Image (cartoon, coloured by chain):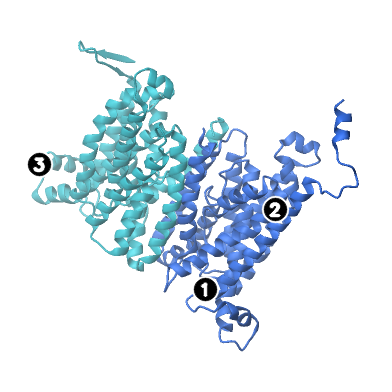
Chain colours: A cyan, B blue
Amino acid sequence: MIVIRTPGGVSLRLRPRSLVVGATAALLALAVGVLAVGHGDYPMSPADVLRTLTGGGSPAEEFIVTELRLPRLVTGLAVGAALGLAGAVFQALVRNPLGSPDVLGFTQGAATGALVVVVLGGSSATLAGAAALGGIGTGLLIYLIAWRRGVHGYRLVLVGIGMWAILSGVNGYLLTRAPLMEAARAVLWLTGSLDGRDWSHAGPLLAALAVTVPVLLAAGPALRMTELGDDAASALGVSVPRLRLLLLAAAVLLVSLAAAAAGPVSFVALTAPHLARRLTRAPGTNLLPAAIVGALIVVTADQVALRVFPSQLPVGVVTGVLGGGYLVWLLATERRAGRL
Amino acid sequence: MEFTLSVIESPPADTPTRSPRRQRAAYRGAGLALAALALIAVAVLSIAVGAKAIPLPQVWQALTDRDAAEYAVVHEMRLPRTLLGLLAGTALGVAGAAMQALTRNPLADPGLLGINAGAAAAIATAALLFGVGGGTGQVWFALAGAALVTVAVYAVGGGRTATPARLALAGAALNAALYSYVSAVMLLDSASLERLRFWTVGSLASADDATVRRVLPFILVGLLAALLAARPLNALALGDDTAQALGARPALIRAGVIVAITLLCGAATAACGPIVFVGLLVPHLVRTLTGPDLRWLLPYCALLAPVLLLGADVLGRVLGRPGELQVGLLTAVLGGPLFLWLVTRTRTNRP
């Protein structure tokens, strides 16, 4: 543990292991990113990619990298970071390792918004907007229903599960109302895919990350205090209801905009915070490591989906299968540890 | 002193007042008869209401008279549909009640805990591997999927440490994983998509004689096993040691109930797709009438759950004119708010 103190009375604690893990994961994500940009009908070596990125490539290479391949990579990184961060916040809010937004109905709300646009017909920009609105609206609804002098973690869980079940019914119905071709497009969207993403997809999400990351990092110390229990945190000067509202709003915003950018990529929000915690071995909520690991998971899964399978799969299939397996393992270990 | 007092206060033997216990049994028996009447009424409605409405007085004629104009409509479409709704409703209601007793958990529901989703994932796998065909094989796949998830859920949630909310969360996570698998299957194969998207909502629309005949034996066996287990399950509610002292065999009963739940949920899901909330809400509503005694709770659920399912189906046919709304949508939209009310009202939301 390294502690940095400034004369102004602000102290910063750094764990060397967390730093090393975070830096390694970030470097790995960037390395996978360089490989990803080099992959395609016009293959480029990593050296070429780096040269083009620093401004030394031919105009054709410049176009291929910055206009065709980089948007996909950046969208993937941003979606992964947003989902990892949101997952870490949700798990801290409901104090359960299974409390991820996919399980609690938030991503289903985004899916409902998108499906309404698919059934009524609309451009992909409208679809993204509707998905974001659907996610945010569902988050608001869950908060209002679960609110009773503050939002207690378990009421949030149960109300979220109820909303999940209702919205699954609605989504299934909407899927039957669409013509077959549109339904296929909708299922592709529901699985989560990075195909054909351009800068307009990455933009809103990057803006949201720029706003929420500082807010969440600033709320980190207060979040750690709530791990002592609501009463102890209140005694230490944390306004627990206001903190919960702030965290929930930030997480819902991130999840909704991530869904708008790439569809609800399943189980990244569940697995990234766990993986981050196991790697850093730091107690409590690892916000930044979770975000970095989330970004690494999404870009790696996307490359696996593109290169390993003969018919190029969307990224959500790979994260879904890996996440499902991880979930079964998690249930078994939680059960054995008596925490479930 | 206590004894003499109580002897003095007890009524003389020749007074004809009935004991409160027998009186309660009489009330409950009458209630059961009322529930049966309600079921018959809904079944008649289910035969009468549809794209071609049949006036109520002519329903009986349409059922029995071969020369009646509506004979074909009733026998080829409405009757199988009604029978399937009846069977599936009974199966889900009884499975829900048995599951709540087995896990001692008020939030146990075959839909919420992922058992129906397990059957759905197995059927999607079958569709991917062997092509889509609603053959007998589908039921076996559904049963295998349901069995796998039932055992998993029981392994996770059967212990004493599992709180309702944690079990529900584990089930919801399983649900999310299984449905993301089903949508991946639909993505890979557009023939599966065309069929599975209608089936995953939960609908009685595709019912025919063959479907009813295919699932009937499984549901009957499951129902019989659940009803036979009612008495020992009551004993089990007192704890394993007490149950053993009362002559019950806990391991045997648990295995029997798991088999019953698997048969009921697997068959119901194979026939009409995954339907949520029926298995959760009916036992809760019925418990306010009967109390926790499973010998009454299970028969009541068997009669009232199909009232809910068929009622929702009829409502879907009325609301969705000229088409129809799938029954799975209606149970989710109607049952969901009830579930939310239940979890925000009661103390089950304690960790």
Asked if the residue at tag 1 contacts the one at tag 3, i.e. Cβ–Cβ closer than 8 Å, the answer is no
**CA distance for labels 2 and 3:** 74 Å
Identity of the residue drawn at 36% across and 17% down: A236
Mark 2 vs mark 3: in front: 2
**Of callouts 1 and 2, which one flags the residue occurring earlier in the amino acid sequence?**
1
* Amino acid residing under circle 3: Gly
Q: Are marks 3 and 1 on the same chain?
A: no
Residue B243 picture location, percent across and down:
76, 38
Q: Which residue is mark 3?
A: A56
* Amino acid residing under circle 2: Ala
Label 2 lies in what chain? B
Q: Are marks 2 and 3 on the same chain?
A: no
Mark 3 vs mark 1: in front: 1
The numbered disc on residue A75 is none
**Image quarter hosting the C terminus of chain A:** top right
* Amino acid residing under circle 1: Val
- For the question of whether residue B178 can be seen, the reply is no
The residue nearer to you, when weighing B165 against A294, is B165
Answer with the quarter of the image where residue A170 lies. bottom left
The numbered disc on residue B226 is 2
In the rendered view, would you say A181 is above or below A296?
A: below
- For the question of whether residue A100 can be seen, the reply is yes
The residue positioned farthest toward the top in the image shown: A7
Local packing at callout 3 (Cα closer than 10 Å; few below 14, some 14-19, many 20+) is few
Q: Which residue is mark 1?
A: B49
Local secondary structure at mark 2: helix
Label 1 lies in what chain? B
Local packing at callout 1 (Cα closer than 10 Å; few below 14, some 14-19, many 20+) is some
The residue nearer to you, when weighing A35 against B346, is B346
